[in-house]
Amino acid sequence: MMRLLPILMLLWLGGCAVQPVAPVVQPAQPESASFAMNGRISIKHNGARDSAGLRWTHQAQSDEILLLTPLGQTAARIYRNATEAMLDNGDRHYQDKDVESLMMQVLGWRMQLDGLHHWVLALPDGDDALVERDPLGHLVVLRQQGWEVRYLKYADEQANSLPKQMQLSREQLQITLLIDEWEWNPK
């Protein structure tokens, strides 16, 4: 019995050990950086599904999103600056005060571009987010502004790597982004 006492003490002390906290990492590029990304987008909304190629160019005061056909032709262009948002699909031109209102007007669902440009960099948009991280410090789940963002795959196993696949969900809307390529400070 006396020989078991040190083992029991070690087990008891081990049970009191503090779990190490995953380090909080920053992506390789700062959130204020301009970027362009190429990839694919899949959207499920109220049972309907759609997908497209995607080219998103983000600057400090503007965004341009090109939705592409399987052959790489532009099916729609979404553009936003500080004062307005526009959507052109070849046949029609739509305009509203911001992307969220524009998407609701044209598509019947809201997409918050202001939050999304942080989320694609695996960063919360401000301090009100609930986050879960993996042992490397990568975001695994982010809940913010009514959205749940799941980071399904990163570009590599480095602590500051960028997302390669992510899923955004809100109410009856699910958006999956598959990011193939990043470009920093595009012209």
Image (spheres, rainbow, N blue to C red):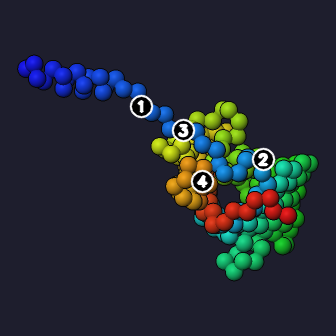
Q: Which mark is residue 161?
A: 4
Q: Which quadrant of the figure has residue 141?
A: top right
Q: Residue at x 71, y 36 (%)?
A: 126
Quickly name the residue at label 1.
19
Is the residue under label 2 in contact with that under label 3 (CB below 8 Å)?
A: no
Compute the Cα span from label 2 to label 1: 33 Å
Q: Which of the two discs, 2 and 1, labels the residue nearer the N terminus?
A: 1
- Residue 64: image tag: none
Q: Secondary structure at mark 2?
A: loop
Which amino acid, by three-letter code, is at mark 4?
A: Ser
Given contact means CB atoms under 8 Å apart, are the residues at marks 4 and 3 in contact?
no
Estimate the spatial distance between the alpha carbons at disc 3 and disc 2, rounded to whole Å. Answer: 22 Å
- The span from disc 4 to disc 3 (Cα, nearest Å) is 14 Å
- Residue for badge 3: 23
Question: Residue drawn 60% across and 63% down?
Answer: 178
Circle 3: residue type: Pro
Looking at the image, the residue that sits furthest to the right is 83
Measured in 3D between alpha carbons, the distance from the residue under mark 4 to the one under mark 1, in whole angstroms, is 24 Å
- How far is mark 1 from mark 3, CA to CA? 12 Å
Q: Quadrant of the N terminus?
A: top left
Asked if marks 4 and 1 touch (Cβ < 8 Å), the reply is no
Q: Are marks 2 and 1 in contact (CB under 8 Å)?
A: no
